[in-house]
Amino acid sequence: MENLLLKVPEVARSLGISRAKVYELIAAGILTSVKIDGCRRVRATDLRAYVDSLPSAS
């Protein structure tokens, strides 16, 4: 079964960026996240939507 919620380090690994950059994207409202008892998580669907919204390289 696919994880529905991803930890920030998992998101960073998936995108090939740093954890700090993931937190920057979250703080800027570019990447949506949820907080559960103090734990920051990103929905797999929100991660996919973020990736799909990125412009194609020309």
Image (cartoon, rainbow, N blue to C red):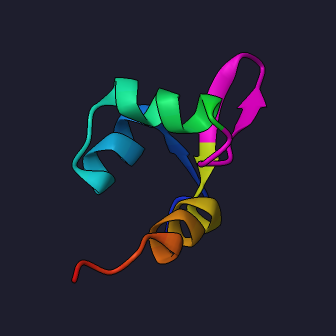
Q: Examine the rendered structure and indicate whether residue 2 appears above or below residue 35.
A: below
Q: Examine the rendered structure and indicate whether residue 12 appears above or below residue 39.
A: below
Residue 46 in which image quadrant: bottom right
Q: How many numbered markers are drawn?
A: 0
Residue at 52% of width from left, 38% of height from top? Answer: 25
The residue most toward the top is 38
Query: Which residues lie in the magenta part?
Result: 29-41
Residue 13 magenta-drawn? no
Residue 23 horizontal side relative to residue 39, left or right:
left
x, y percentage for residue 1?
Answer: 50, 71
Residue 56 in sight here: yes
Q: Examine the rendered structure and indicate whether residue 6 appears above or below residue 4.
A: above
Q: Quadrant of the C terminus?
A: bottom left
Residue 1 in sight here: no
x, y percentage for residue 31?
Answer: 60, 48
Residue at 74% of width from left, 29% of height from top? Answer: 35
Residue at 33% of width from left, 42% of height from top? Answer: 12
Q: Nearer the viewer, residue 21 or 6?
A: 21
Residue 51 horizontal side relative to residue 31, left or right:
left
Residue 37 horizontal side relative to residue 30, left or right:
right
x, y percentage for residue 5?
Answer: 60, 50
Residue 37 magenta-drawn? yes
Q: Nearer the viewer, residue 24 or 10?
A: 24
